[in-house]
Amino acid sequence: MKKIREHVHGLFKEIPDSEIKKSMEEEIIQNLDEKVQDLIEAGKKEEDAINKAIVDFGDIEDIKKELEQSSAAKQKLKLRLIFSLWACGLIVALCIFINLYFTPDIIWFIFPVFVIIWWPFILFYRWYENRL
């Protein structure tokens, strides 16, 4: 069913590569192959069955929108993670500087750093969870 595979890949060519895209393509190809086999068993010729399955399937505008939104959300999470790492690094550096400049005898910067460091950890977990 090379024609079906080429048609489905053509529908998805504008969408950036991802695991979700690949699994969606394979699922659609499998469903169309099953429909073609059902139509052939019902007495249609192979070429007619393939064309009917493709026409009945229609377009994938809703799927494209969903995949694009998913991709945009993942990109936002990645940017938030990068921002939190930079901001956390700057805040930690500021705490260390203030501690060492004003009160070098007492090491207190560890306490605010411990609280601040959770921000990137939480965003990393959300990014890691959503990247799959």
Image: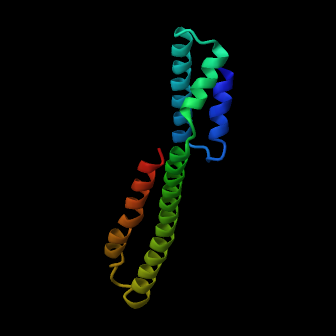
Q: Residue furthest bottom?
A: 102
Residue 75 image offset from top left, x and y in percent: 53, 58
- Specify the quadrant that holds the N terminus: top right
Residue 43 image offset from top left, x and y in percent: 56, 9
Residue 117 image offset from top left, x and y in percent: 38, 67
- In the image, is residue 2 above or below residue 132? above
Q: Nearer the viewer, residue 12 or 37?
A: 37
Q: Which residue is drawn at 40% across and 54% down?
A: 125
Q: Which of 27 and 118 is in front in this view?
A: 27
Q: Nearer the viewer, residue 31 or 117?
A: 31
Q: Which of 96 and 20 is in front in this view?
A: 20
Q: Quadrant of residue 54?
A: top right
- In the image, is residue 27 above or below residue 40? below
**Image check: 117 left or right of 68?**
left
Q: Which residue is drawn at 48% across and 72% down?
A: 89
Q: Residue at x 56, y 20 (%)?
A: 33
**Image check: 14 left or right of 72?**
right
Image mark count: 0
Q: Which color scheme is applied?
A: rainbow
Q: Residue at x 37, y 88 (%)?
A: 103
Residue 111 image offset from top left, x and y in percent: 31, 74
- In the image, is residue 113 above or below residue 29? below
